[in-house]
Image: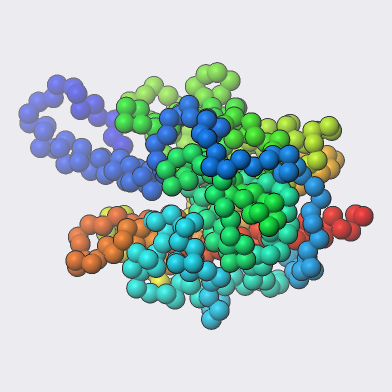
Amino acid sequence: MGSTNPFKDISLSLTNILLPCTLLALFPIALFSFYFHLLLPFSPSPQTEFTNSSPITDISHSSLSASPLSPSSSSSSSSSSCDYSNGEWVQDKRGPLYNDTSCAGFIKEGRNCIKHGRPDSGYLYWRWKPSECNLPRFEPNTFLKLIENKHAAFVGDSMARNQLESLLCMLSSASAPKLVYQIGKDNQFFSRWHFPSYNASVSLYWSPFLVQGVEKSNTRPNNILYLDHVDERWIKDIDQLDMIVLSFGHWFLLPAVYYEGGSVLGCHYCPGLNHTEIGFYDVIRKALRTTLNSIIERRGGKGKGNGIDVIVTTFTPHHFEGDWDKAGACPKTIPYRNGEKQLEGMDAEMRKIEIEEVEDAKGKTSKLGMFRLEALDVTKLAFLRPDGHPGPYMNPLPFANGVRERVQNDCVHWCLPGPIDTWNEIFLEIMKKWEKQTGSEH
């Protein structure tokens, strides 16, 4: 962005020079606004409390207390040392466990690519093949057995919701979950589902920064983040949780002002404000560190309960090509071949930060016991799937009346069913590995 102040009294002779520059400078603002539109589920009050809404059906938190993982008949089906983050996508004729109609009740409209008229279906017939082992097909009954009498929560931004939607769809092929609690339109702010047959609950907490934050509005163009304070709106329920899946990152690319220690630390993309531009890499590191430290402090010490499992899903790249408002913003219909594209730049750095912070936190928890922490490293396998986004099919039948010159595209989130189902296949393998380790300790 240029530093020219458009409110200064300038001569008419400069107008013809500055006007094109001004229009050019407005383009990044428009791109930021659209990117924000994709990530924002709706605009709740920043003071909204998750517990202020009446439940659809009460569920007893006493029945959701943590307990050792239940035995799984298939816990030995995968290698406990497999690196699932490296591999390649190979064709698979079996296709997904669910479709757009069998799971319509859990899929956000913008992710239901089949229903919205996406003409190709090849993106549904790929599976991830790790370099060192096989990744088993998702087993919904095994997953449900592992969370029996437990409460798992997905905490984060719309990517957390995307992964949760995928999980609910795959689980529903074996046992139908019941929505028992919700706050916000389309279950997007806070929701809870219950699987009666297993007395298992899965919740979603909207918290795009994980730490305390105030989202931008029509009157304030910047997000405000307090990097040394975890978001109490979700962590206040931590004593009711047995497992937490954290997923965040994309909201840190948006304009923001950062606070630490009660004063302004700096900002990202805040022209007109007298703050130091510090980007977002150190900020996302601080936010994740604050979050993990807060979980450790509240559930990791002696006498803090029966333990907790924590998963951090790593950053998933977007695949915009060219203009975001053109029909071909993410036009690919097949995955990249392994080696065809290199994971680098921002995507690689975001992943690196998250992996490092998880490893640092694991060092702090190694002697705590009953505290398990793992990174769900999906950055590379997501990077290789440019074909898996809704694109123009974020909206129903976008080309019913012919190809329009401009059309909204979502090249950030993932079609359901689609590649994001693989995230949960790896998630299950982590849980099975933990179960195997628990069994060997007895």
- Counting from the top left corner in percent of width and height, residue 176 is at 58, 60
Q: Farthest front residue?
A: 57
Q: Residue at x 39, y 68 (%)?
A: 114
The N terminus - image quarter = top left
Q: Which of these two is toward me, 27 or 238? A: 238
Of the 4 image quadrants, the one containing the C terminus is bottom right
Q: Quadrant of residue 371?
A: top right
Q: Is residue 363 visible to us here?
A: no
Residue at 52%, 35% in the rendered image: 54
Q: Work out which residue is located at the far left of the displayed protein and give it.
A: 12
Residue 339 at x, y percent in the picture: 53, 70
Task: Give the residue at the far right of this rendering.
Answer: 442
- Exactly how many numbered labels are in the figure? 0
- In the image, is residue 349 above or below residue 7? below
In the image, is residue 394 above or below residue 173?
above
Using the image as rendered, state which of residue 28 and residue 407 is in the foreground: 407
Residue at screen point 42% across, 24% down: 275
Is residue 61 visible to us here? yes
Residue 264: percent from left, percent from top: 49, 22
Q: Farthest residue toward the top?
A: 262
As drawn, is 118 to the left or to the right of 398? right
* Residue 70 picture location, percent across and down: 79, 57
In percent of the image, x 80 and y 36: which residue is there? 305
Compared to residue 139, the image places residue 47 above or below, namely: above
- Color theme of the render: rainbow
